[in-house]
Image: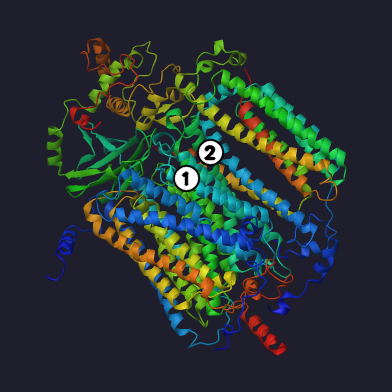
Amino acid sequence: MSGQNGHAQYKEGGNAHHIVSPVVYVVILFALIIGTAATVWASFLELGVWNPVIALAIACTKAILVVLFFMHVKYSSKLTMLTVAAGVFMFLVLVGMTLADYISRAWGNW
Amino acid sequence: MSATIVSLPDQSTARIPKMNYLSKENGLLSWLLTGDHKRIAILYLISLSFFFFIGGALAGLIRLELLTPQADLMATDTYNKVFTMHGVIMIFFFLVPSVPATLGNFLIPMMIGAKDLALPKINLLSWYLYVAGGLLAIYTMAAGGVDTGWTFTTPLSTHYVNTNVLTTGLAAFIAGFSSIFTGLNFIVTIHKMRAPGMTWFRLPLFVWAHYAASILMVLATPVVAIAIVLIALERTIGIGVFDPTKGGDPLLFQHLFWFYSHPAVYIMILPGMGVISEVISTFSRKRVFGYTAVAFSSVAIAVFGFFVWAHHMFIMGISNYAVLVFSLLTMLVAVPSAIKIFNWTFTLYKGSITFETPMLYTFGFMGLFTIGGLTGVFLGTSGTDIHLTETYFIVAHFHFVMVGGMLMAFLAGIHFWWPKMTGRMYPEKISQLAAVVTFIGFNFTFFPQFILGTLGMPRRYASYPPEFQILNVFSTAGATILGVGYLLPVLYLVWSLKYGAVAGNNPWQATGLEWQTQSPPLTENFTSTPIMDHEAYDYEWLERQKEKEVASV
Amino acid sequence: MSESTAIAHGAAEAAHQEHPAYLRHHFENVEQQADATNFAMWIFLLTEIMFFGGLFTAYLIYRNWYYPAFVSASHQLDVRWGTLNTLVLIFSSFTMAMGVWCAETRRRKGLVLCLGLTFVLGLAFLGIKTIEYGEKIEKNHVPGFHYSLNSFLDPEHDAAAKQYGDKPLPLDMARHTEVYFSLYFAMTGMHALHMIIGIGILGYMMFRAWGGAYTSGHVTFVENFGLYWHFVDIIWIYLFALLYLISRHP
Amino acid sequence: MSHISPVLWQFLVKWMTNFALFPPEASKIAPEMDALYFFMVLVSLIGLTIVILLVTSFSILYSKERHPVAVQVEGSTLLEATWTIIPLGLFLVMFVWGALIYFRVYTPPPNAMNIYVVGKQWMWKAEHPGGQHEINSLHVPTGRAVQLTIISQDVFHSFSIPAFRVKREAIPGRYNTVWFEATTPGTYHLFCTQYCGTEHSHMIGDVVVMTPEGYKKWLAESTSGMSLAQNGERLFASLSCAACHNTRPDARGPSLAGVYGSKLTLTSGQAITADDAYLRESILNPSQHVTQGYAPIMPTYQGQVSEEGVIALVEYIKNLDSDYRIQQTLNTTELLPEGEGGAGAGGGKKPAAPTTTPKGMVKQ
């Protein structure tokens, strides 16, 4: 966590807002469309256990692209990145620890 | 008069400053549409007290019913509704918002040297949400009540009761969003609105505690919100997420519910701990022992608090291995609380202690919270939890932490900052009496319940085997004393609004920024942005400050 | 009042005169205000993650338990509608991002156009969703009293199921398709609710943007709404992968 | 004493003769759990005393009168480490100790005698293997491990016997187990501790612990004439289970003889031990529990068999150690007397639970 005080950050004033160029947006848009096509295509293949893995991997890639570029996180402060990370982490705690109970219920004899 | 405690201003000349946040505007609308965090805090204080006394009246009914082993005062059905509403009102409409929404709202901007919270409109919105939720809860009571218990256990709440589960759920849902917005506001304010020189490690511990609690509010509350939504959908259109007859797992509801409701107890207690840190430092005139340890223990409680929820489910048939993990993590979360208790104790060491009312409440807090915390370990230990859970032991433990801990801290804080909020002192002698009465009444009420729990008396029973009666009579008798202890402050605090001695800026000679401005403060809090040039709880700085002032006069 | 603690904050005082109207009184300057509201929006999105997190947890558990039911039930969703809706939302995210760019570069008409496109795409998404819901209602796939198992017990007579060569599910497994549809309606319903709220705010923003409210330097509102809109898009990306694309191979 | 009001006096007498401070220890696990309990009480008392002593002595020593000027102390890493590590160590001891007890309470020994418990709003029904059927009471012998297999028919309940220090939630849709070995004959409380609706506080009963001889006598006196397994057998026949589960070479289902406790491989490749929970699940959700080599053709019996019916079936299958009985059932299916084996035979939605004895009819 930053030790500097709240106001000092704003004194400089110059800390100009990063404006993302539309070209980047267009590139991301196409990447997302390709991702959508790829994930639909992959779901029609017989890949066994890899089907959900691929679907989730593509979904995560798309989500990361949106977060980084459309939501400007790539150009944002560390605090914003930390916030996103905290959100993902707590989500994983909720899912992971709940699932851990369900998975380990099958161990042992009851 | 002594060297450290300055005298109150001479009563004949003392005046409440003409310009202050209370006098700035008049009329009901100026309150209902205000963006001023201090006015919103007062609105909260009034509405919270209202709900506290409704919840308290319900508690009185519960204790009266339990005076005899038979369900004779009311039918079991009525009793079930009474304890459900007691739980819902006390938890969602008193404990969760209590310290943060009143004292936190009032003080956080002042403590960090800001003019207001970052999002004043959201702050007002969260008060309106709170009131809307509260009115819905009251409506539920008028419309026949609800008898699921505040835990909304499925499938009871979805398929087996015909009472107002939907309105109660909606009330809790709305109150949840009120709490989310409060927490969100605090986090943003603490990050972005600190005055020049106010570094993280110069923040008062009150602010640290609220920061930790806010993280919990923001991350945990939405999970119970979605659980309530699913219950509502299950009741209305009959979806099958928790319904075992359709293949759902009712334990999943327990997971989602406790993912919020366990951190919720830290949401309730952490701000109280913040109050204790401030009070104990001020009245021993000493920096809090191990400032960093206390600050980090707040954060540690918040973080570990997320990993322990399933200790509410030890006997429900979750995996034994999950029980191991959750039990171990529960032990870890107990440690920061122990650290806090000892650090507060050693704050007294070599201090110069005075025993004003807030300090008495603080001593009460330390004793009762120690008992409450240690009995929590009984329940976190998986083996003894089997015997003690779902009995009056749980009830006693929870009330020791929440009423003995949280409510004592709330009252300590209200008394401590009363001069700042109103500009007037509360009457000292009678308030000391109230503190002592509360402490005695509390122990009478809830200590017997530990024994009842060990004996195995289940909670939420309208009738019970006769051999439990004597302890229940003790408990009910204690509750009447406790009731007196809670009524007294209302009377004398209201009295003091008009007749209390004028307090002056800094009656306690405390170091926080909130004390370095007039009482009651201006709407903008400070005449100009303060600059923090010293550590928190720096009493030597305060001394130097006063010398300078004397010299300049 | 101790004077020395509250030394007049010279810089702030001097700057006071040149502050624009949209700067609220309790902030020192525009930067701080923008930063604070942006951070607040992110914290709000955190709560949204956890809100949907509960649903995703439920989904993962039941998908593991009742995999065959989930596969057969997901075949009842039309992957073409789903893909189209995904593309619609991705486009709307793009137009929203462009809208933010227009606001930042002070293009009033461009902003109104982008917001308008986003608005229309949002409505299109909801329209398609309504068609899909209509299909479910027609086939009695809405959980509850009228829920029908015909498509799963007798896939031969069900066009959607036949297309993927579904075999009839045993009765107990077929019953668990209701869990799938419970989650389907809960998840897409919550998502649609967010869309509706978003579209409402978009309408308000278009109105304000026409008056030039966001193209004079004060872009925080548009930016923050953009964050919300992109977040809703991300949720859909996952919903699409989890609800529609469990396994489509025949 | 005459100046004390007689009413109050009466109360006092009543209370004093009817007053408890600590529950009786009537099971083998109880003294062990109490040992941990008292250890924790001791630690808590010591901790509390330390805090109280420190606060009181500091308050006296450093009150403003005695100590007008405070000495600023930053903190002490050594002290803070002490009160981090010592509580942590103590808590970890409690954790390990508690976990050992927890695993004991919820891991029944293999030779335990099994009693089924069904919770419903608002009563406990206990089914003994011998067909004895109780409501809101439970008779158990001393000196013998008793395993309870608990399930709820509607909402969450919780089966609690404070004198034994055991408790287990009764949950709809799955079996939970707990076990104990009673040591002292007597009558003890049985509570439902999970809030379950209007009559929650009336869902209480008695646990009667008897000497082995007394228990034997009780068993003989309260038998309904048919054991649980026999009831199961009747149900097995009326549901025509034997049509598939037989030993004929063309049998469509696996033989159930000796299946209980054996290791099975499912079609999913998962290896599983056939326990009570598995048997129950494969009756109600068969398609998820198909043994390797068989087609998933078994219909579900959800909605056709009550929880008690499932229990009877499970108990019947548990006791099948040869195919002889199945062959018998196969031959006698048609010969069943009218009315008795009618459960479910007509495809009725809610069959009269064949296990319900006249005694069980008392309530509901």
Q: Amino acid at mark 1?
A: Tyr
Considering depth in this image, is C11 or A92 the residue closer to the camera?
C11
Estimate the x, y position of residue B478 in percent, counting from the top left.
Answer: 33, 64
Does A72 sit left or right of B56 as displayed?
right
Q: Quadrant of residue B154?
A: top left
Considering depth in this image, is B440 or D214 the residue closer to the camera?
B440
Does B104 sit left or right of D270 as displayed?
right
Q: Quadrant of the C terminus of chain B?
A: bottom right
Q: Amino acid at mark 2?
A: Val
Q: Residue at x 67, y 51 (%)?
A: A83
Q: Chain of mark 1?
A: B
Q: Which residue in the protein does label 2 denote?
A: B229
Residue C122 shows in the view: yes
Estimate the x, y position of residue A38 in percent, counting from the top left.
Answer: 73, 27
Identify the secondary structure beneath mark 1: helix
Q: How is the image coloured?
A: rainbow
Estimate the x, y position of residue D142 in percent, counting from the top left.
Answer: 19, 45
Q: Residue at x 31, y 27 (%)?
A: D314
- Please give the label number shown on residue D207: none
Q: Quadrant of residue B289?
A: bottom right
Vertical order, C72 against B444 (above or below): above
Q: Which residue in the protein does label 1 denote?
A: B139
Does D185 sit left or right of A64 as displayed?
left
Count numbered badges in the picture.
2
